[in-house]
Image (cartoon, grey):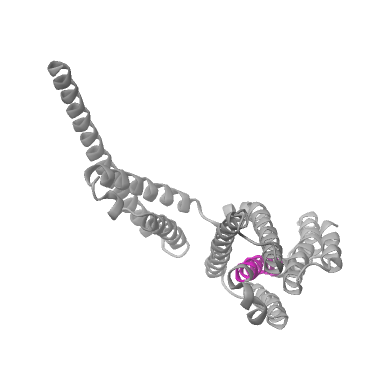
Amino acid sequence: MLNIVAIYAIRKTTSLPKNLKTLLLSQAVSHLGVGLLVQPMVVAQAMDSKRNSETRLIPTKLLIFATNLFIFATLFSVTALCADRFLAIHLNLRYQELVTYKRVAAAVISIWVISALISMIRLFRPCQIMYVSFVIIESACIITATSLSAKLYLTIRRHIKQIQVPQVAQNDQGESVQRKRKSAMASLYVYLVFIACYLPDICILIPTNLFIFATLFLVIVLCAERFIAIHYYLRYQELVTHKRVVAVVVSTWVLSGLFSLTRLWIPKNIMYVVFGITQLACIIAATFFSIRIYSSVRLHVNQIHVLQLQHATNG
């Protein structure tokens, strides 16, 4: 019901740009499809679970197709919405020239066609291969939407600081920037709600090994960072920059995801050996760095005590 109200409100709101209205309608329709089609089909199939799959009122393949169709349409629509607002903020004057209504409409149609094709492939390909493909596609969409939303937020913060400066004139261009900033904030809110609603599905799709390996690798990274800070304190700011730390953290999560995905096609015996060696190597490396850090800290503490005693004696 709320999605129907949202679709009606979007259609009647004349202040929304046509591009933004088209993307919001696409997303609202995908949510409406989940509420009107997928959820009643799931309930009907659960009530009809005692029958054979061939005699059920709601065929399993139809349910799988509808579920995947609206899931991927929602994913792609949110990503397209974040990309559109990102271009509107960053291109500014060139946005109307590059992002036309025809191109946005073509993008929305492509979203639904691609979602339908992916959903149909799911019916004819092995589950393990499709599982890996779905996780990769969903992860790519979420990472892209997250990075665009983060850049949007930083740009909006910078614009707010510029607007607060007294020298900025309140002209037509300033009002245009204000409208784009409000629409960008709206897309950020849409993204946050999407992540909050999609988080349970992410937790189910992503194997537990992802968080295990991410924890192991991040502990090693933290120990190595503190080791460098203590042993190379004069060159620390030069060697360990913020960009390098961010790159290492992103690489950690990507590597953890790759390790987790390998469990889907590698035999269990080989997988256990590889995982055991990896975990053992991580624990040994973290232990080594921790012992070196502890020894250095103890050495520094002793040196401080000696200096304090010398100062007290001289005093």
Report the label total.
0
**Residue 193 pos. (x, y %):** 68, 54
Q: Can residue 228 be seen in this view?
A: yes
Residue that appears at 36% across and 59% down:
270
Please name the predominant secondary structure of the magenta segment in the image.
helix
**Residue 29 pos. (x, y %):** 78, 67
Residue at the extreme front: 167
Residue that appears at 39% across and 58% down:
243
**Residue 84 pos. (x, y %):** 64, 70
99 left or right of 146 in image: right
Q: Determine whether 258 is above or below 95 in the image.
A: above
Please state, as top left, top right, bottom left or bottom right, where the C terminus lies in the image. Answer: top left
Q: Where does the magenta region start and end?
A: 68-87
In this rendered view, identify the residue nearer to me: 4 or 169. Answer: 169
Residue 117's quadrant in the figure?
bottom right
8 left or right of 25 in image: right
Please state, as top left, top right, bottom left or bottom right, where the N terminus lies in the image. Answer: bottom right
**Residue 269 pos. (x, y %):** 38, 57
Would residue 56 be counted in the magenta stretch?
Answer: no
Residue that appears at 65% across and 82% down:
97
Q: Determine whether 82 is above or below 314 in the image.
A: below
Q: Can residue 284 be seen in this view?
A: no
In this rendered view, identify the residue nearer to me: 292 or 281. Answer: 292
147 left or right of 184 in image: left
87 left or right of 298 in image: right
